[in-house]
Image: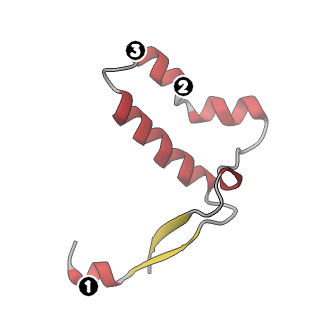
Amino acid sequence: MTAEEISMVHIRRAQAGDEETLARIQTESWRAAFAGIVPAELLTQCTNLAHGFAASGKKQSALGAVEEMYVKERQ
């Protein structure tokens, strides 16, 4: 990343509508962290976003789980 690219980054508070992106980030982090520790089939089941959203009948909100959450945007 160049100095110019770094200066173009904006940090803002997470807001409604960010849930899907935050869920994907968390899911990919879990997959990377637990690969080789948790059996692959179980890890796939536990990190299946489509199944999680479908089972609840709605998009799940990660925003209520913490007091403050911030996201990075490029301008």
Q: Determine the CA span between mark 3 and mark 2.
A: 11 Å
Label 2 sits on residue:
46
Q: Residue drawn 68% across and 37% down?
A: 53
**What residue is at 29 percent from the left and 79 percent from the top?**
5
Q: Give the answer, above or below, for where 19 lies relative to 35.
A: below
Tell which of 59 and 29 is nearer to you.
29
Q: Mark 1 points at which residue?
A: 4
Percent coordinates x, y for residue 27 in the rendering: 48, 39
Q: In this view, does 10 lie to the left or right of 37?
A: right
Bin the neighbour count of mark 1 within 10 Å (Cα to Cα): few under 14, some 14-19, many 20 and up: few
In front of the other: label 3 or label 1? 3
Assign the N terminus to one quadrant of the image.
bottom left
**Picture layout, residue 70 above or below residue 74:** above
Q: Which amino acid does label 3 sit on?
A: Pro
Q: Distance between the residues labelled 3 and 1?
A: 42 Å
- Marker disc for residue 39: 3
- Classify residue 10 as left or right of residue 63: left
Instruction: Count neighbours of disc 2 (C-alpha within 10 A) and say few if under 14, some if 14 to 19, many if 20 or more.
Output: some
Type of amino acid at the residue the image marks with label 2 = Cys
